[in-house]
Image: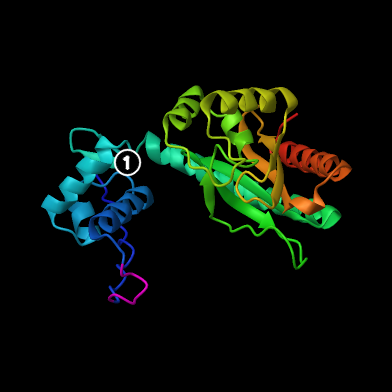
Amino acid sequence: MATTTQPRSAPPEPADNGEDGSHSYLIAAADRALRLLILVGDTPGLGLSDLARASGNSKARTFRLLQTLEATGFVRRKGSEATYWLSYQAVRLAARAEQQIDLVRLGQPVLEEIGKRCDETVQIRVRQELESLCLSKWETSRIVRYHATVGGTSPLYAGASKVLLAHAPDAVQRAVLASQRHSFTTETPTEATALLRELDRIRDSGHCFSRGEVSPEAFSVGVPVVDAGGQVVAALLIAAPLVRAAGERASELLALAREGSQKLSQALGHG
């Protein structure tokens, strides 16, 4: 005898609070699609009618949303009765989320240890398309310090985040070289030939120094973080005012960045 699965209700829709409310920039179609994707993930194997009923959408709208999610690889249809399941893009997204959560969970103690020893700002940054994103940070309490914002982004071609570009796929490097590169300071490497030489040097040396490339008074050093499969998944950066990174101090900060990167890479299963 066939059994039926009781579909779970979709998450409640937030109220639109108007121009000064927290949901004033919510895009209704994107919101419905994402809520439907969550519903498919929570209750796999439902058909169109059940998904429409559980999501509160009409069958026509649910069908269009599912078509979009299927075309972008987030859901797939199975069987003659057309039930819906998560597909490869959802799995890929989940794997990336898990990896980034691991980077934060395992990386925060490393950032704190290295940060306290050098008394400078330490970050974990990851590549997001053609930018680097600050995933986690530890900041010194010094009045004059380099400020970092979790979730903040910067171009891959400027600053110590170039270590991520140096180890990015060829297609990403070509896209960066083909893009319009903005000069933040006179030290920003925007010329293609010079940037390519710098990426070669980073791969050979295993680190990246940046002196005044994003801000004229900022110094940073970046080293790659490697996972169990040997892939560069992040960069560990130490950033400081340029005046505190002169002479041997730059080498000391590089040594600490390498130590932190090695500890985090080992925590991720490398080596």
Q: Which residue is located at x 71 percent, y 22 percent?
A: 204
Residue 238 place in picture, x, y as percent: 73, 48
Q: Nearer the viewer, residue 33 or 186?
A: 186
Does the rendering let one see residue 1? no
State whether residue 193 is above or below residue 223. Answer: above
Question: What are the residue bounds of the magenta stretch?
Answer: 18-24
Q: Which residue is located at x 62 percent, y 32 percent?
A: 232
Colour convention: rainbow
Q: Nearer the viewer, residue 36 or 138?
A: 138
Give the quadrant of residue 209: top right
Q: Could you tell whether 88 is left or right of 212 in the image?
A: left
Find numbered disc 1 in the image and state the secondary structure of the residue it sits on.
Answer: strand
State whether residue 191 is above or below residue 66. Answer: above
> Does 260 appear in magenta?
no
Which is the main secondary structure of the residues drawn in magenta? loop
Question: Label 1 sits on what residue type?
Answer: Trp
Question: In the picture, which quadrant includes the C terminus?
Answer: top right
Circle 1 crowding by C-alpha within 10 Å: few under 14, some 14–19, many from 20: many
Q: Which residue is located at x 51 percent, y 40 percent?
A: 95
Give the quadrant of residue 77: top left
Q: Which residue is located at x 19 percent, y 55 percent?
A: 52
| Residue at the disc numbered 1 | 85
Q: Could you tell whether 10 is left or right of 208 in the image?
A: left
Question: In the picture, which quadrant includes the N terminus?
Answer: top left
Q: Nearer the viewer, residue 129 or 262?
A: 129
Q: So how many labels did they put on this image?
A: 1
